[in-house]
Image: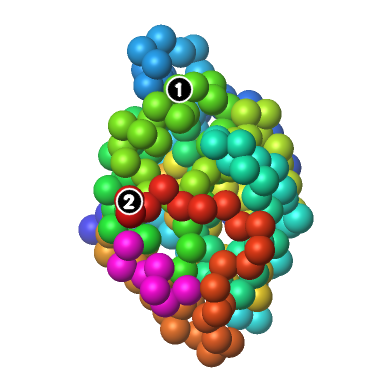
Amino acid sequence: MPRKPRVRVLAAAAVAVSLAAGCAQSGTAQSGSGGDAREDRYVAGDGSSTAFRPGDREPVPEVSGETLGGDPVSLADYRGDVLVLNFWASWCGPCRSEVPVLNEVHSENKDAGVAFLGVNIKDNRAAAKAFEENQDVEYPSLYDQPGKVAQAFRDTVPPAAIPSTLVVDRQGRIAARVIGETSYNELSDLVEPVAAEKGGAAAGAPAGRPGTADPA
């Protein structure tokens, strides 16, 4: 019987540099939303996940910037909520196919104090905004063309692939990671136990948090 894939702990700096540079060890280039062929290649993940017990969790780094819409955003804005942080790019095929999963888990858990924030990495802003509109993404994304956000995680739990998803608990600690495209069952099984942990949901979005793209 083949062994179940396991997440390997790689050298954090090497992983972050590889991700930020958009270098492919596997996978093929995808066309961006703007229709232009790209030379970029992504590091493909296998969808494997890891959950961390509270005592083993690393704090998220201090990260701030602006959304694709130009609003200021910081990870600190989400303290008190569970935060699902999804790294993506418009030229990445698996990023496109996992959007319905992310939207569904977001919709089902937002009333439990679970927020979603994308991190658009190594991308063209216009192509990324078109991706958000065409795929009906229901939450904002931080624009990170240089890949600085991924590098900021190099000493904690690096994303290690595009797409990758991190689940951050209400205390601002990394509770889980998915390397590669996630599924509804996988993501729900990671998010819901963290949302149920004692500590209390936020009473509302802290001042300064960017609005979501939820339809009125």
Distance in Å between CA atoms under marks 2 and 1: 21 Å
**Discs 2/1, front:** 2
Q: In which quarter of the view is residue 172 placed?
A: bottom right
On the image, the x and y values in percent for residue 167 come to 51, 63
* Label 1: which secondary element: helix
On the image, the x and y values in percent for residue 76 come to 69, 62
The structure residue drawn at horizontal position 40% and vertical position 36%, both measured from the top left corner, is 132
Badge 1 is on which residue? Answer: 127
Which quadrant is the N terminus positioned in?
bottom left
Q: In which quarter of the view is residue 26 placed?
A: top left
Query: What count of labels does the image hold?
Result: 2
The structure residue drawn at horizontal position 31% and vertical position 68%, both measured from the top left corner, is 108
Secondary structure character of the magenta stretch overall? helix
**Which comes before the other along the chain, label 2 or label 1?**
1
For the residue marked with disc 2, what is the amino acid? Pro
On the image, the x and y values in percent for residue 67 come to 58, 41
Relative to 28, 162 lies left or right: right
The numbered mark at residue 110 is none
Residue 56 drawn above or below residue 64: below
Badge 2 is on which residue? Answer: 215
The structure residue drawn at horizontal position 67% and vertical position 29%, both measured from the top left corner, is 146
Which quadrant is the C terminus positioned in?
bottom left
Start-end of magenta stretch: 107-113
| Residue 109 is inside the magenta segment | yes
Residue 18 seen in the current view: no
**The residue positioned farthest toward the bottom in the image shown:** 198
* Label 1 Cα neighbours within 10 Å, binned few <14 / some 14-19 / many ≥20: some
The structure residue drawn at horizontal position 27% and vertical position 48%, both measured from the top left corner, is 100
| Residue 192 is inside the magenta segment | no
Residue 117 drawn above or below residue 141: below
Residue 136 drawn above or below residue 191: above
For the residue marked with disc 1, what is the amino acid? Ala
